[in-house]
Image: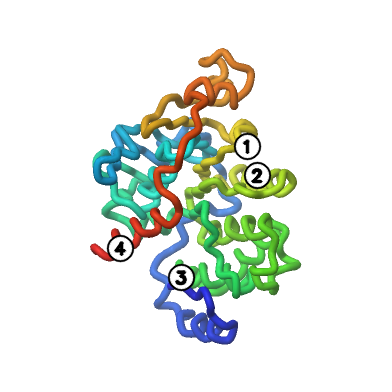
Amino acid sequence: MILRHAELGEWRSVRRALDFPSFYSGPSVGVPHNAAIPSMDDTPPIIRVEHLVKQFGEVTAVNDVSFDVRRGEIFAFLGPNGAGKTTTIRMLTTLLPPTGGTLELDGLDPVHQQNAVRRRIGVVFQDPSLDQDLTAWENLDLHGVLYGVPRTERHARADRLLELFELADRRNSVVKTFSGGMRRRLEIARGLLHTPRVLFLDEPTLGLDPQSRNQMWTHVQNLNQTDGVTVFLTTHYMDEADRVAHRIAIIDHGRIVAIGSSAELKERTNTQSLEAAYLALTGTDIRDEFAGATDRMRQAAQMWRRR
């Protein structure tokens, strides 16, 4: 459902039409705000990937990839352009079927249990996806309606998230008037509205100034620590991964070349910084993207038409 050019009055009519009890199809699956957060070492992984393969014709974008992500962990998935990062995320988030291997998210199969998986994840992709003609509040409200979150609950969450991401004073402003950092914060808030167990962030700070980047990661760390949200992120800023990630996986040419904490990767490569360790593991050659945003959209459209 896309309301890219919706007028505010049209959105309110849509919201009223959808806002009825039978639209809500199940209980919230998020972690209660007052719940005790278990140790990552005490729980089974929330994400398991085993021998994952994805081919586009004769090109193998992901080649025999295996890793797991612990519950409550901030996990950074790093690699050069075209290494397979976004392709892997698209498979984990049900948007792309794998060619081979197995995936598991919170005990569910993203290939065969798509709707259940989607209720457990929040996603912020590289490309902006907010409706520019709606206000911050209406973007959050629409998301909550589409995920079946009851009115009282979604309004309380929207209020909390707008406060948390320092957007409360702009709740009634249309998104087209926001700065890049404000839009990114709103996208993350929207991804958290239905209390997902895993938040996927695909290069969320691309194009943001240092102040906005610092503020955004502070909010993400606080959410991870207070609500126990597992975070799966990609970034090209090594300082961000070094700062926030509990563990880091590095993928290159479709294969995992290293997994460990920042300190472990530095020790393994005998380097003093994560960036130096990353370059030691992936080399210094400049890479081209395997597929641009338009190509990825075309692939997704072709997949959905076949269903």
From this viewpoint, is residue 262 visible?
Answer: yes
Find disc 4 in the rendering and name its residue.
Answer: 304
Find disc 3 in the rendering and name its residue.
Answer: 146
Q: Secondary structure at mark 1?
A: helix
Residue type pointed to by label 3 = Leu
Looking at the image, which residue is at 52% across and 52% down? 126
- Pick whichever of labels 4 and 3 is earlier in the sequence: 3
- Pick whichever of labels 1 and 4 is earlier in the sequence: 1
Looking at the image, which residue is at 30% across and 55% down? 113
Looking at the image, which residue is at 55% across and 46% down? 203
Q: Are marks 3 and 1 in contact (CB under 8 Å)?
A: no
Of the numbered discs in the image, which one, if any, rests on residue 240? 1
Q: Local crowd at mark 2 within 10 Å, few (<14), some, or many (≥20)?
A: some
- How far is mark 4 from mark 3, CA to CA? 19 Å
Quarter the C terminus occupies:
bottom left
Q: Position of residue 245 (x, y in %)?
A: 57, 34
- How far is mark 1 from mark 2, CA to CA? 8 Å
- How far is mark 2 from mark 3, CA to CA? 27 Å
Q: Toward which corner of the image does residue 21 lie, by quadrant? A: bottom left
Find disc 2 in the rendering and name its residue.
Answer: 217
Closer-to-camera residue (52/106) = 52
From this viewpoint, is residue 153 visible?
Answer: no
Residue type pointed to by label 1 = Glu
- Pick whichever of labels 3 and 1 is earlier in the sequence: 3
User: Which mark lies nearer to you, 2 or 4?
Assistant: 4
- How far is mark 1 from mark 4, CA to CA? 34 Å
